[in-house]
Amino acid sequence: MTEAEVERLFLLAAYSFEEENDRRNEIHVSDLTNPCVRAVWYEKKRPLPPSPENALRMLEGKLLHKVQVIPGSTMEMAVEFEGVKGRVDEYKDGVILEKKYVDFVPSTLAEVQRYYMHYIEQVGFYAFMLVSTGHEFKQALLHFAKRGEQNERGRYPFKTFDVTSLIDLDKVEAEFYNRKTVIAAALKRDEPPEVPANFSPNSYPCSYCKYVAICYSGVR
Ligand code: SF4
């Protein structure tokens, strides 16, 4: 076997490892937490595959999901409400645990709120959907694990935060319907929503987005 053959097979295996079902005709919790409706539109209507680097990141994330943290929990529990689908990393007796590989492990709850608000929103939506489908909700936990070595002084290689107190189910419910409505309306259109006026190619979320060349080059 040649080196090139192995490299090609490796990348193919990384892309196809536990491949997701086709999500183009579905709305998922990850769509509700996406900060850009235009990006959601592209993901459903004209999706680009992830770069090899992102495929490897996704592989890491999928492997982390295989690690059971809470003994006896239901792993990757499917939940669906009002046509929105989600998959909770771990659930047991009202406790939700979401596990994230990140480049930056927060040290405080304030840092979680500042840098990872979308993950707080995600567990909030799960909590709302679980309660709405007859499940118990008592606690929401976010677990962060550092990608690669932690060499920043004073930071941990992994850390868990209880974000239960940040979840107001009434507000989450309003936001759930609001975002679902906006996304559903955008997806009815044949052209993507415009790039929001306050977005720039050099700042979040565009600086992390695979559609940045499409959005800012004028190419359709
Ligand atoms: S590059 Fe920016 S505007 Fe374009 S889809 Fe991505 S996040 Fe949205």
Image (cartoon, rainbow, N blue to C red):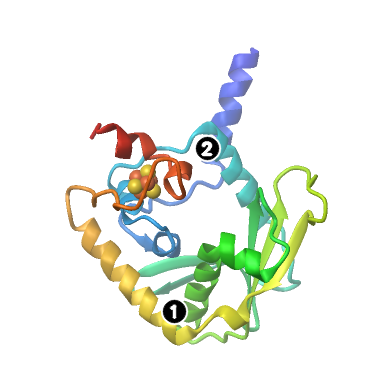
Image quadrant containing the C terminus = top left
Point 64% across, 12% down: residue: 2
- Horizontal side of 104 relative to 135 (left or right) equals right
Image location of residue 121, percent across then percent down? 50, 70
- Horizontal side of 138 relative to 196 (left or right) equals right
Q: Disc 1 marks which residue?
A: 172
Point 49% across, 34% down: residue: 51
Quick one: 83 or 118, which is closer to the camera?
A: 118
- Above/below status of 185 relative to 53: below
Residue 32 placement: quadrant: bottom left
Image location of residue 134, percent across then percent down? 48, 87
Identity, as a three-letter code, of the amino acid under mark 2? Tyr
Image quadrant containing the N terminus = top right
Quick one: 24 or 108, which is closer to the camera?
A: 108
Image location of residue 111, percent across then percent down? 64, 64
Image location of residue 157, percent across then percent down? 78, 53
Tell me the number on the disc at residue 137. none
Q: Residue furthest right?
A: 153
- Above/below status of 130 relative to 36: below
Q: Residues within 10 Å of mark 2 (few under 14, many from 20)?
A: some
Quick one: 174 or 66, which is closer to the camera?
A: 174
Identity, as a three-letter code, of the amino acid under mark 1? Val
Tell me the number on the disc at residue 15. 2
Point 64% across, 46% down: residue: 60
- Above/below status of 88 relative to 132: above
